[in-house]
Amino acid sequence: MEAFGLLMDGFATALQPLNLLVVFLGVLIGTIIGMLPGIGPINAIAILIPISFALGLPPTAMLILFSGIYYGSQYGNSISTILLNVPGTASAVATALDGYPLAQKGRGGPALAMSAIASFIGGTLSVIGLMLFAPVLAQWAIRFGPAEYFALMIFTFTTLSALTGGNFLKGLIATGVGLAIATVGLDLTNVARFTFGQFRLYDGFDFVVVTIGLFAVSEVFTLIEQTRGGQVAVHRMGRVMITLKEFTSSIWVMLRSSLMGFLVGVLPGAGATIASFLAYTTEQRLVDREGTFGKGDIRGVAAPESANNASVSGAMIPLLTLGVPGSGTTAVMLGALLALNLSPGPLFITRNADLFWGLIASMYIGNVMLLILNLPLVGLFVRILLIPRWVLVPGVVAIAYVAVYSATSSPFDLYAMTAFGVLGYFMRKLSFPLAPVVLAVVLGPMMEVNLRRALSLSNGDWSTLYGTPIAIGLWIMIVVSLFLPFVFKRRKPLVAKVVRQTDDEEG
Amino acid sequence: MTDRITGAVLLAFTLWYGVMAWGVPRGFFSDPLGSRPFPLAVAFFLAPLALYLLLGRPATRPTWAPRGTWPALIFALVAFVVYAAIMEPLGFAVSNTIAFFALSLVFRAPPLKGAIAAVVATAVIYVLFGILLELYLPTGELFEGWFG
């Protein structure tokens, strides 16, 4: 019953005018950037971090805003997927399998409606999961010391490297490059490393600059190659509504997929993309008796859309309770929280109860807002898809420049951002995943701090790293995760498809 | 071939990074581990991966940009760098208009429409971020005398 009182307090926080405004802005921005191919939540959040700091937004409002963008993007991504067969983010690729055939038959409207409803169910159920399980996991995580954290971070790196992009070797290299970037600057004992006597390098590379460069700037280069010009043709939608029969035939699909998406989301490294594919293939096996999946079966929209939304709240659990994010987007959110001097971890929820419960309440509110935005108002968003690229891309670049410049008022970061953009472009070309770089840039310093702290506590005795049952368990999981790519090899066509179509934009 | 080149570049980077890491001084207040081992470990982690890429079976066959788009790519890159370079001397309004226009041309905007969009978008961003949200956008050293 205590949780109920806390949740009511949370609603009191979330319903404050500023917080209500930011949750609306968050889900609105999320829907739009989710819908636009090439701009994912990771870009939007990275660009908004310096802006929110410059505005002096309170931490609660900031977290509500970023989360709104994150789960909002999982609603919006199906719009372009269904109508144009161009996935807004990688996690919507599975939605295209049945969504686009439906649009071709003139049933884009029902597909969009089903996507919005499935997203709402997945989103809301997973907030309940987040609310119930995060405090429990936090209780358990209190036993984590520096040695356990060090092992947990390695586990996060190995799973993310194994599961994104489909090439383990390249995932590991991306992690290593990220760690190398992270070591630039003063370390915890104020020793300057890789600074070449340049004072502006003493603070190291800001993760915002790295993220915007790797994802947004490199995306501009990628889009240049694809510019064939011309307007896009949007299929006639029909009414944005589903029948009761369609709803009842999909209800179990949505419930199962939500659960699966939530659980996959909690795992480090396995995000919305894997959740949506896993849900799609599972439901295909379970309910597709007539072989209609892939030809325009509305349940084939319901499964991935409920799963990818559910995975988002799942992914918030390791971020908030352990302070160890499992994906690029949650890594960027962690970076923002660290910059606010809030270090998420086992005590985060109890110490910042108003923030945590305000966030939970805002997520319930945000999902309702998203349902309204994505059902009756979906027609308005579709018009945004008609904005020509020659307005959209320079506009995004301009906002990125404003954001990065406002953070430090120095052109140096702008040059660095462009350099990371070139790096990101070549990494995409050579099929290296980008998310591990961002994760390593954010987690690298924490990883080193935990390693050095653990060894300080043990006076340099390395056996402390595997001295507790939890640490041993984590090391075993690390070894197991090294074999994950071989298990997933069977799914290679699907993974390859994700990579080819969208690179790892989901982050 | 691509993997061999990537592996060679990565190996060169790793060696350079490792040598730099070797030269990291010991901190004044040092813990048992010190500042040097972590970057060294990163170098030791990357080195075999780079070697594997260099000597293993090549698997990457990237599709490079068609030759025709290279000028556009380089033009865009120049636009990014120039934008950063002129931000402070010319100020946000002028530099953003120029950069926006240049990028819109890369994406095949009709020149007149692109120019109008550049001016309008710059004004919108200036009002939204510079005036409403009160972010610092440089006026430009060139114009500093003009506006007191």
Image (cartoon, coloured by chain):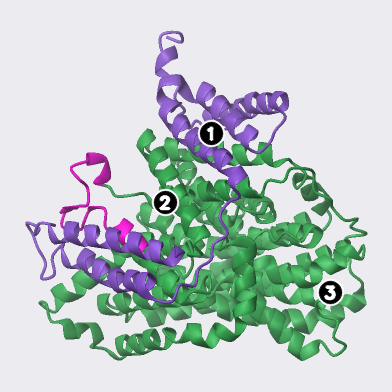
Neighbours of disc 2 within 10 Å: few (<14), some (14-19), many (20+):
many
- Residue A125 at what x, y percent from top left? 66, 75
- Residue B14 at what x, y percent from top left? 27, 62
Give the magenta part as a residue range: A177-202
Neighbours of disc 1 within 10 Å: few (<14), some (14-19), many (20+):
some
**Lateral position of residue B43 relative to residue A304, left or right:** left
Residue on which disc 2 sits: A210
Q: Please name whichever residue, B131 or B119, is drawn nearer the observer in this view of the structure.
A: B119
Q: Rounded to the nearest whole Å, what is the CA distance between mark 2 and mark 3?
A: 39 Å
Instruction: Tell me the element at label 2.
Output: helix
Residue on which disc 1 sits: B133
Q: Is residue A184 magenta?
A: yes
Inspect the image, locate mark 3, and give the three-letter code of the amino acid beneath it: Ile
Residue on which disc 3 sits: A298
Q: Colour of chain B?
A: purple
Q: Quadrant of the N terminus of chain B?
A: bottom left
Q: Please name whichever residue, A110 or A62, is drawn nearer the observer in this view of the structure.
A: A110
Q: Rounded to the nearest whole Å, what is the CA distance between mark 1 and mark 3?
A: 43 Å
Q: Chain of mark 1?
A: B
Q: Chain of mark 2?
A: A
Q: Please tell me if label 2 and label 3 are on a single chain.
A: yes
Q: Colour of chain A?
A: green
Instruction: Tell me the element at label 1.
Output: loop
Inspect the image, locate mark 2, and give the three-letter code of the amino acid beneath it: Val
In front of the other: label 1 or label 2?
Answer: 2
A95 relative to A213, above or below: below
Q: Chain of mark 3?
A: A
- Circles 1 and 2 in contact, beta carbons < 8 Å: no
Please identify the residue farthest to the front as the structure is shown: B1
Please identify the residue farthest to the left as the structure is shown: B28
- Residue A94 at what x, y percent from top left? 70, 72
**Lateral position of residue B128 relative to residue B43, left or right:** right
